[in-house]
Amino acid sequence: MTKPRYRAFSFGRIAALTANTFTELSRLKIFYVILLFALLLIGSSLFMARLTFQQEFQVLKDIALGSMSIFISLLAIVTTARLIPQDMEDRTVYTILAKPVPRIEYLLGKLAGVVLLLAVSLAIMSVLFFLVLKMREQTVLSDTLRQMKDSPPDQIADALSTVRASAFNVNLLSGIALVYLKGCLLAALTLFVSTFATTTIFTTVVMVFVYLIGHLQSIARTFWLQTNSAGWITKLFLACVALLFPDLQLFNLVDDIVAGSPIPLALFNKTATLGLFYTGFYLLLAWTVFYRKEL
Amino acid sequence: MMRFVVIVLLVVLFGAVKLPAELALSATHRRLHFRAVEFDPGLREQIGQLGFVAALSGFRALVADVLFVQAHMAWERTEWGRVLFLFRQVTTLQPRALLFWDMAAWHMAWNASAAALRDPAQPRLALRIKAQREYIQLGKDFLERGIRNNPDRPQLYEALARLYRDKDKDHEHAAEFFEKAADLPDAPSYARRFAAYEISYCEGREREAYDRLHTLYSAGEKERLPTLIRRLKDLEIKLDIPLDQRIANPVP
């Protein structure tokens, strides 16, 4: 009888862990977050009747992309924070790691499950957002046509193209992609924190602070690199913040996209690469702590 | 102990790799005029602790929108001081949104200035005119700050040109800003024409205006609009252009 061949690294095992994590997470009540997002979008359109169509589209896009950013960041932190503590509480982690599953595969599978959940959630939110935007665009287009029915055809075409340009913009997609990358890096960072944290609440609270510090990291970096008058303790503290924390402001391009600034492809690619680098590094850090952790 | 050293080394290595990338990306953001909210303690007092934290946490567009809706409601109640206060915050939070600069300037230079001139609480006309001029100046300030934050987009140059033209009858400045708008990509086709119209009202620049308007006229039927023909006809008389060189169109 031949022994089954054992592979040191198996995508099959990671896929199984990913599918399991995704199923487990999707059974949670997290999809209420998406319902809340939909209600927010629909509710916000109530007061928009008082605004002009350009203001309306700007506010609608700001609310939608801002909510996506909030909910995806929250989802990434809250769902990842409970993964390892929950597995320990349920004793699932012992069953898995007792089998020939390397710890890096376990972490990769867990992270991939969260990343998949974030992708599905963001896809649903994006579809909802584009549907609301399209519906409002159609309403404004038919209103414009009605109001300008006696105008020359070139003026009507001009007005309609202005409405269309104010509504959908292809740059919105790159903004959504950056929201997703920010979610992925937050998930990896949460996974790292949860490898040494003892409770879910501790991880979540730490991550809320990390989130805030990440948005102020650029200020700490500038002070560290450009201020000479600060004492060495201050400088050391600023250096730690600048070296350890990710600069989350770099991923907040949605505000500029909604404001009408196009995002050059090179800038998008560099930001995406940095996002993947952060995610990879925090996963590596999580593995360094986890691989010899006493369970 | 070994693991601790490895982690410290990894962090230092991570910092050494990410820091240049972050600095390069920040520099690109500055070059493209993408601005994060300025770390200004005055802003915290204006928008409150919660709003300030929200603005610094990547939700500045949402905070700006909430303030914008508040400004809109203040405008409906004609509370001009509050409109000004809120628009200052909105434009600080979202300096790349042209709409906010344009709306702020419009409220100040057109609505608030007109309301100040008809203010029933102020019996002295001189003071009403003074208040009107101050509001127009506030409108200009918004547009000038908006242009400094968005020098690459034509809309605010055009709005400032209209303000100079319609509120100050300052054709020199109106021409200058229409011209600047016309030089930028995505400028509307009429910006160049409007610049020429404004030059035609400037003392001593009639010849230049005539040449520009004639060039536009020669560009084709699409440019031969009633105002352009009227301005050309006026300049032909003023400059005493020989009859055989005058345009054939009748005065509209």
Image (spheres, helix red, strand yellow):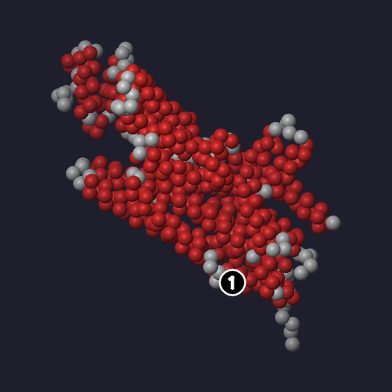
Query: Looking at the picture, how far across and down is residue B76, in whole percent?
Result: 34, 40
**Residue A169 visible here:** no
* Neighbourhood count class around disc 1 (C-alpha, 10 Å): few under 14, some 14–19, many 20 upward: few
Q: Where on the picture, by quarter, is residue B171?
A: top left
Q: Where on the picture, by quarter, is residue B38?
A: top right
Q: Where on the picture, by quarter, is residue B241?
A: top left
Query: Looking at the picture, how far across and down is residue B40, in whole percent?
Result: 58, 35
Nearest to the observer: residue B2 or residue B137: B137
Residue that lies at the very extreme toward the right in this rendered image: B1
Query: Looking at the picture, how far across and down is residue A249, in whole percent?
Result: 58, 45
Which residue is disc 1 drawn over? A24
Question: Image check: A80 left or right of B16?
Answer: left
Q: Amino acid at mark 1?
A: Glu
Relative to B131, is A208 above or below?
Answer: below
Residue at 84 percent across and 57 percent down: it is: B2
Nearest to the observer: residue A236 or residue B50: B50
